[in-house]
Image (cartoon, grey):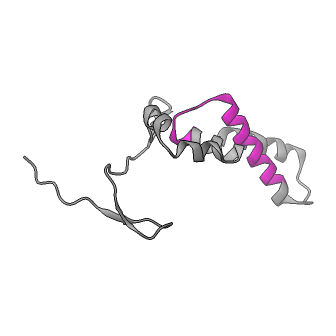
Amino acid sequence: GRYRRKKIRYRDEVTGKMITLDNPPIPGKQSLAKRTSIPLVSQVEFSTSSWRRAVLSLEEHHKAWLLWCYSGSICWEHQIAITQWAWNEFNAQSGTRKIAEKTRERLKKLIWLAA
């Protein structure tokens, strides 16, 4: 058989302890041919994990982003929550600057496409 080297140990940023990961990181690249993304965490792992409660207790836009990106839960409500949050953040940062209506409409479409 193949020689398996020692598992890589990482320092936990919260506790400062060294931990060994059982599984290597999974690359999650978008499949351009199929226009789908690979969920980084399987649905079974997500639904049975203890950190699910922590994710579900987050603010709505944070929860929607995590579920959209990492659990493969692509539903309409998540996309709406993400785009509403992005638009509200943009409006808050733009402040009182005047922006042409045509530009604002294009920005709305861009935010919608980005989510």
User: Would residue 37 be seen by someone viewing this image from the given angle?
Assistant: no
Where is residue 34? Give x, y as percent: 46, 28
Left or right of 56? Residue 1 is: left
Q: Quadrant of residue 69?
A: top right
Q: Look at the image and give the residue range highlighted in magenta.
A: 68-91
Q: Residue at x 58, y 39 (%)?
A: 67
Above or below, 82 against 14 in this view is above
**Magenta region includes residue 74:** yes
Toward the left, the furthest residue is 1
Instruction: Assign the C terminus to one quadrant of the image.
Output: top right
User: Would residue 86 be seen by someone viewing this image from the given angle?
Assistant: yes
Q: Residue at x 32, y 49 (%)?
A: 23
Q: Residue at x 79, y 53 (%)?
A: 90
Above or below, 53 against 12 in this view is above
Left or right of 82? Residue 25 is: left
Where is residue 107? Give x, y as percent: 77, 46
Q: Quadrant of residue 74?
A: top right
